[in-house]
Image (cartoon, helix red, strand yellow):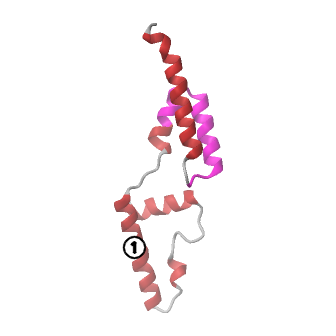
């Protein structure tokens, strides 16, 4: 069997694996899952590449630790000033995509 005959099957397997990752990824909004499924399904190779480049958001442990330190400092200062510390918690009450944006914004 020729290698070129295997390419469509390899692509199908790759699309199925990426689709499973899109659907099973924790902390992702349902609308975002659907949008990525459409991109992966309609753009044969570019969709998979786009998801791998832009769909996997990983800000790293160091940035998360830095964000937690900043939030802790903000809450300490707020409490010392007589204000409600929860008011200065940027993560409180936000969706996961908004939280990711805030964490990225603070830790960039």
Location of mark 1 (residue) = 70
| Residue 86 vertical position relative to residue 66 in the rendered view, above or below | below
Instruction: Residue 85: give x, y in percent of width and height.
Output: 50, 83
The structure residue drawn at horizontal position 53% and vertical position 36%, both measured from the top left corner, is 18
Residue 108 falls left or right of residue 87: left
- Image quadrant containing the C terminus: bottom left
| Residue 46 vertical position relative to residue 90 in the rendered view, above or below | above
Q: Nearer the viewer, residue 51 or 102?
A: 51
Q: Nearer the viewer, residue 22 or 54?
A: 22
The structure residue drawn at horizontal position 53% and vertical position 17%, both measured from the top left corner, is 8
Q: Which residues are magenta?
A: 27-50
Q: Residue furthest front?
A: 1
Q: Residue furthest left?
A: 62
The structure residue drawn at horizontal position 57% and vertical position 45%, both measured from the top left corner, is 24
Q: Nearer the viewer, residue 105 or 41?
A: 41
Q: Quadrant of residue 12?
A: top right
Q: Within the magenta stretch, is there residue 45?
A: yes
SS assignment at label 1: helix
Instruction: Residue 42: give x, y in percent of width and height.
Output: 61, 29
Residue 41 falls left or right of residue 85: right
Instruction: Residue 53: give x, y in percent of width and height.
Output: 44, 40
């Amino acid at each position: 069997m020729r290698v070129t005959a295997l390419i469509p099957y390899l692509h199908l397997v790759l699309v199925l694996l990426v689709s499973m990752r899109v659907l099973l990824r924790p902390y992702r909004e349902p609308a975002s899952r659907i949008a990525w499924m459409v991109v992966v399904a309609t753009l044969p190779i570019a969709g998979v590449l786009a998801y791998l480049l832009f769909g996997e958001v990983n800000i790293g442990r160091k940035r998360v630790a830095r964000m937690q330190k900043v939030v802790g400092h903000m809450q300490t200062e707020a409490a010392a000033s007589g204000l409600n510390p929860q008011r200065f918690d940027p993560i409180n009450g936000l969706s996961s995509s908004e939280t990711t944006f805030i964490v990225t914004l603070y830790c960039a």
